[in-house]
Amino acid sequence: MEAFFRAQRIAVIGASSDPAKIGGRPVHLLRKHGYPGTVYPVNPKGGEIQGLRAYATLADTPHAPELALIAVPAPMAVQAVRDCAERGVPAVVVLSSGFAEAGAEGAAWQAEIGSLARRHGMRLLGPNCLGTVGVAERAIGSFSVALEDHYPQPGAIGIVSQSGNIGSYTLQLLVQRGAGISRMVTTGNEADVDLADGIVALARDPATGVILCCMETCRDGDRLRQALAIAREHRTPVLVLKIGATEQGQAAAASHTGALAASDAVIDAVFRRHGALRMRSHEDLVEVGLAVSQLMPDRLPGKPAVTLVAASGGFGIMMADAMSQAGLELPPLAQPTRERIAAALPSAGTNNPVDASAQLSSRPDVLFEVLSALQQDPGESTTVLFLSLALYSTRLRDIYLEALARLRATYPRRPLVIISSGPADAVAQIQALGIPTFSSIDAAARGIDALVRLAGLEDSAAPHAAADVTVAPCCDAAALPDEAFRNEYAAKQALVAAGFEVPQESRVQSADAAVQAAESIGYPVVLKIISADIPHKTEAGGVALNLVDAAAVRGAYARILENVARHAPRARVDGVLVAPMLRGGTELIAGISRDPVFGPVVMVGMGGIYAEVLRDVAVQPAPVSEAHAQAMIRSLRLFPLLDGARGQAPADVAAAARTVARLSEFACRHRDQVAEIDLNPILVRPRGEGVAILDALIVPVRNAPVPEHENSHAA
């Protein structure tokens, strides 16, 4: 990927003398912004283009270029890529459109150029992209209008975008805010180089301190996860704006798990697991990205706490509302801090928010003393200063800039954030001091929350690799028998063989056998019909609970068969299940679904109505370690129910985590066979007593009809 950013010789195939044309713009931009290397315009007419000698063919250039930009119609671009391969060009940007986005013929051309690149060991970016920029090297492989009037200053922010326009717009907004840029990569149709390649290239780039990623889709989940892991190893934060949601692999999920583990939730889980921070708006991506570039590597706020300062009580209230809604705390100031503020500014209110009044800006020394007191407060919260109109006054601007410069020099590591919408030159001066500036109160609240979350991701970077697990897919000898997919009983037998905790139960074919099984298990018991043709056992009258003696079992057995015969006379009946009637404990639901991009995904949530109505679930790509599984369980909003809320006995969370981790490994081993698994419910007993899988469903990849299971304490 280095040739895209450091090429000393760049060819423009399809070069034009008209700077307004796609073939003319790269030549124009390279010359305008002082590219120090050699530019080879390639055009069949030869001659001169924009003051440079033009070559009729790529083969005519005196040296093979290190980077070729292709700006010819799609049918001609295929031959141009072939020419680059034969010339030994290491990197190619296909700026042209008209490929897979245009239909079947274009898709065939795109497949061909991708194949050419792979066969010749050549990296190909695009087609249908806005190319690349190596800012410090002035290596422009793009026709972006964002470069027309303003060239970025070198800096720490790298941009990777699948959309050329979004990437270009991101670059423009950052340049307008005075941010320094390292590289920009736009991947377009991704015939070869994809988003993951861009992330890895920027993560390994010493000049890049933070990566802003604009993502539309993910075509290869494993590659994305590897790229994010590499970025994490290099301690390069990745901020992702993910637009849209990946399509579900199935039109309708056969299990509860498939419905609950939506693909967008999986993307969220991937980002969290690999240390990437998801942004919810383009504005936040730009503002938080700029703040991260100023604060990394060691000045991120470590606590979700803020101390607010404004020259107006009303603005202080607005700030307090926004920060609280973002989940940030407003801790009280220490008494010595309050006394220092009062001594420097007797008119100030010394609560949090600090109502500094208009006197705050009377003199630089007063402003410095008040802010110094806050920077030294033992609470270690982030100081947030709101400037409404002050920077528009030349006199006040000078006071604030003098005080802020002195403050940053005196307290270089303590978090300080400014809220101001302008003017732009004054904001740029503040940002040049290394002080993050947000354009509004709400943006600052979201931004500080994001910075705190990023700090948490950074803190968790060290143990993450050790916690990951790798599980090989099953071999033929370990393959699940077809019987495992037949019904609840068969699914449970497969799980028992794999070491899962399933209560003792029996499949019987007569009332006498049911009584014998019940006496062996111990009363009370549950009876359930076993049939692949009855998706809703309860509705068919196929379940009987809390049977306390032999007579109750005999009566229930006969009643279940009569109900089923009346409800579904053609149903295949595989017998009746006899299981213990378990009480107590807390119900969880756990399962596996198949994400179309990331493969097996494990889900865990509170059982019963909590999972489906409240959607209180956590998901992760499989496999997960026990540590990851326990973190998933603890992330549930209703986790206090497992943790001994209101004096109840704490549940065996460790056993539940073992079950979830084992389930994820089981799914990975059998990923070629298993589409979905549902364990619903899992009864989590008091701490030290383990868990019990009360109902189970395994759905095969071939999507054979499989019955739903019941939500009950029936095993």
Image (tube, rainbow, N blue to C red):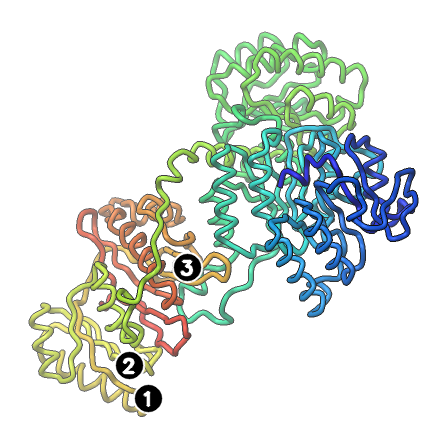
Helix, strand, or loop for circle 2? loop
The amino acid on which the numbered mark 3 sits, given as a three-letter code, is Pro
Question: In percent of the image, x 75 and y 51: which residue is there?
Answer: 95
The residue where tag 2 is placed is 531
Helix, strand, or loop for circle 3? strand
Quadrant in which the C terminus appears:
bottom left
211 or 409, nearer to the observer: 211
The residue where tag 3 is placed is 600
* Residue 654 x %, y %: 26, 47
Q: Are marks 2 and 1 in contact (CB under 8 Å)?
A: yes
Question: In percent of the image, x 47 and y 14: which residue is there?
Answer: 335
The residue where tag 1 is placed is 568
345 or 569, nearer to the observer: 569
If you read the primary sequence from the N terminus, does the residue marked by circle 1 or circle 3 appear first? 1
The amino acid on which the numbered mark 2 sits, given as a three-letter code, is Ser
Disc 1: CA contacts within 10 A as few (<14), some (14-19) or many (>=20): few
